[in-house]
Image (spheres, rainbow, N blue to C red):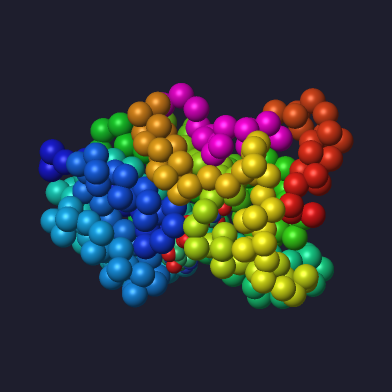
């Protein structure tokens, strides 16, 4: 088995995934970037020392795509996988009753089934690697659901629940599990999304209007890379909130659901 540690990242060609790949690369790790966007992958590749990165055009909704790419990754990494980062996701929004059902199914297909597929494809390598971590991207939406993000929220609660279940199940393999719950992270996704229903592009305005402090202040993508690094170093927490204030809604709702609702309503996701 190779001496160098390795991380494989879905949605690795952009935003949080790419930033995490670069961070781990600077720590001397081998990095696999899986993404469905070939042109972004090509651009991303140029940011790494070519010997330390492999890229694969992968749609996480396809188990075959993932199995094939993981086989190539195994050759590249010398048969080890220290961190599988199931991060690919999409986030179309809108009022639940106005959204297209097909689009909502697609959110579940990518954000939930895509994570199932990624984990199943990675599991043999994770099992073969001591102290490995299966890490997924959930969302602050999985603390208290956000309005105009109902299907997305449902998908991210699913990821959070999956993490908890697998933290029990994968104990028998010595594979740790964790997830990251980001608030507002400055990535192409955050800037690209449009407020459906309102019918106007809103991310630029939203970026300006974000609170300057607290759970929904704008964070750089590097904060996610640091959380992924902490998740690998620290085997205790399984939910990593970025920024840490995102955890507040989770704590509050256990004791005072009305206050938790009001707290969320006071933010931008109304
Ligand atoms: N940016 C935020 O504020 C924020 C907050 C909470 C959670 N998230 C989650 O973080 C993750 C990363 O988002 P980001 O902000 O870096 O977005 P991003 O759009 O910059 O990156 C996501 C990447 O996933 C890829 N992707 C999408 N569908 C795919 C598929 N079917 N197969 C393979 N790759 C696919 C895209 O091509 C893209 O490169 C997502 O799961 C997102 O839901 C983001």
Q: Is residue 27 above or below residue 171?
A: below
Please indicate, yes or no, whether residue 165 appears anywhere in the rendered image.
no
Locate residue 165, reporting x and y percent.
Answer: 54, 38
- In front: 129, or 39? 39
Which image quadrant is residue 161 in? top right
- Horizontal side of residue 233 vs 218, given as left or right: left
Residue 29: tell me if it is visible: yes
Residue 161 vertical position relative to residue 98 in the rendered view, above or below: above
Seen in the image, is 2 located left or right of residue 93?
A: left
Residue drawn at x 83%, y 29% as measured from the top left: 256
Position of residue 89 in the picture relative to residue 81 (left or right): right
Rendered residue at 79%/39% (across/down): 263
| Furthest-right residue in this view | 258
Give the x, y percent position of residue 81: 27, 45
The part of the chain drawn in magenta is 235-249
Q: Residue at x 56, y 63 (%)?
A: 191
Q: Quadrant of the N terminus?
A: top left
Q: Is residue 39 magenta?
A: no
Q: How many marks?
A: 0
């Amino acid at each position: 088995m190779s001496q160098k540690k390795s991380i494989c990242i879905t949605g690795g060609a952009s935003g949080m995934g790419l930033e995490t790949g670069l961070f781990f690369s600077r720590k001397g790790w081998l990095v696999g970037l899986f993404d469905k966007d070939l042109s972004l992958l090509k651009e991303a590749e140029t940011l790494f020392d070519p010997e330390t990165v492999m890229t694969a055009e992968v749609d996480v909704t396809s188990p075959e795509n993932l199995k094939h790419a993981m086989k190539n990754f195994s050759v590249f990494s010398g048969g080890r996988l220290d961190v599988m980062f199931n991060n690919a996701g999409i986030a179309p929004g809108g009022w639940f009753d106005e959204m297209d059902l097909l689009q909502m199914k697609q959110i579940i297909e990518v954000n939930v089934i895509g994570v199932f597929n990624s984990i199943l494809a990675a599991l043999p390598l994770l099992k073969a690697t001591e102290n490995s971590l299966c890490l997924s991207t959930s969302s602050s939406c999985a603390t208290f659901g956000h309005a105009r993000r109902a299907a997305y929220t449902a998908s991210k609660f699913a990821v959070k629940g999956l993490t908890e279940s697998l933290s029990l199940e994968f104990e028998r393999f010595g594979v740790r599990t964790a997830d990251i719950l980001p608030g507002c992270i400055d990535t192409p996704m955050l800037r690209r999304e449009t407020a459906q229903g309102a019918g106007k592009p809103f991310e630029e305005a939203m970026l300006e209007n974000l609170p300057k402090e607290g759970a929904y202040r704008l964070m750089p993508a590097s904060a996610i890379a640091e959380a992924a690094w902490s998740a690998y170093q620290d085997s205790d927490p399984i939910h990593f909130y970025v920024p840490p204030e995102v955890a507040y809604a989770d704590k509050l709702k256990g004791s005072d659901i009305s206050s938790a609702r009001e707290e969320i309503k006071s933010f931008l996701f109304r």
